[in-house]
Image (spheres, rainbow, N blue to C red):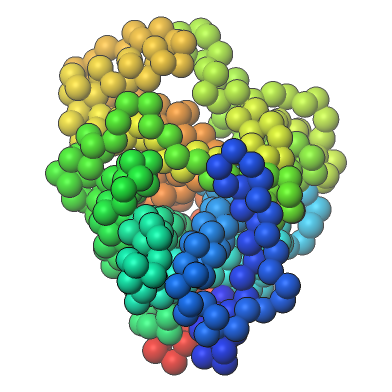
Amino acid sequence: MSGIFDNRKKIEGGFLFLLLTLFLGACDLSVTLPGETPADALDDPSAAPLLTVSAQGAFECAYTQYALLSGLVSGEFMGSQTFLGQVPYQRRDVRPLDASFATSGCGSSTSLHTPLAQARFIADDAINRISGFSDGDVPNRSSLLARNALYAGYSYTTFAEGWCSAAFDLGPELQPAAVFELAKERFSMALESPDADIRNAAYMGRARAQMNLGQTAGALADARAVPEGFEFFITRSTAASVRENKIFNRNHVEQAVSVDPAFWNLEWAGMPDPRVNVMDAEILGQDGLTPMWFQQKYTSRDAEIRLASYTEARLIIAEVEGGAAAVAIINELLDGAGLPGNFASSNAEEIQEQVQEQRRRELFVEGHRMGVLRRLGRITQFTSGSHPYVGDAYGGMECFPLPDTERNGNPNIT
């Protein structure tokens, strides 16, 4: 059965499995609960911090998977491996019946749907439970609620950007627009946080959702609320394999994915672009055919992954405002990268193309590419053709499908 359905059945049966391996604050706190925790124990107000840490851990693992596997589909990476389970991603042709995509847990290198479904469920379940507690029972209750809402919001956003459709809690099949609306609701809840970082990440997430919905005025207002220099990260650590940066592992350690040629040797004004720092390793990948190029954004197993940033906010402002404002932001980003800020144009189409070019460079391998290409109607440009070294034809997929296991386990999907 699907990840959502499995979790729901466990709660109805009295149990919810929580695996916590979190990096918090300045030190690495790895917590593994011994087996399963009775669901009624989670109704105790003292469990509220545990619920919140669970939501964060589940989302961080799922998003790390998404950043890697959506990068394979959207042309940031190309496969260079021999593992059969990776083939659907390498061919950019994931199908509803693909078991590794649909049902594997977050420890698998090919899992995607179930980890994100579980992350969304755990965050929403935590919101429901903590909402039933009083402020007197739960210290920092508003902060905990907002943090869970933030991870729920980004879970919904990831589903909406990457999936053709989705379903939650045995509910009906939803199209991406409806899922983005759910994300907006959670981000609005997260804006109640007393923590500025949570609020800023929520503004950024809501701006992202509204851009996808075509609500440009709201997206612009939220993007403008993000302060200069802001960044919010997915934490990674070496405490457990599910906590590691899988982009680094699959690229550097296992040589199972290589940077796609579209990102090799990128320059600006004759200078190498440090935002897309990639290196020719001068070796072949696992398959013995694909040249290995290493991304240098993540250079260790515990390298964090940026989830939200002022940079992303500036790109949204540039896209919405266009014209001279966009030109100024483009040059601001170039200057910030140590490159000549010498872009000049009064052509609206040319300016918008340059905004998208700066976006693909600034947000390289951060999990944005597939959603952006779908929003712009350009995803099939990267899922057509064939692997340049293996020769496998790409499948032309536009989004990850709702798995057959989800349909078969949900009586409300026809």
Image position of 307 (left or right of 26): left
Which residue does the image show at 32% across and 20% down from the upper left?
330
Task: Name the quadrant of the C terminus.
Answer: bottom left
Image position of 389 (left or right of 404): right
- Using the rendered image of the protein, determine whether residue 240 is visible from the camera's viewpoint: yes
**Residue 134, quarter of picture:** bottom left
Judge by depth and name the residue closer to the eye, 105 or 292: 105
**Residue 341, quarter of picture:** top left
Image position of 89 (left or right of 315): right
Which residue does the image show at 37% across and 20% down from the upper left?
333
- Across and down, in percent, residue 337 comes to 46, 16
Up/down of 104 relative to 190, above or below: below
Judge by depth and name the residue closer to the eye, 388 or 29: 29
- Using the rendered image of the protein, determine whether residue 401 is visible from the camera's viewpoint: no
Q: Residue furthest left?
A: 217
- Across and down, in percent, residue 342 comes to 34, 8
- Across and down, in percent, residue 308 comes to 41, 41
Up/down of 227 relative to 191, above or below: above
**Residue 93, quarter of picture:** bottom right
The mark tally for this picture is 0
Task: Name the quadrant of the N terminus.
Answer: bottom right
Image position of 121 (left or right of 318): right
Which residue does the image show at 22% across and 34% down from the upper left?
224
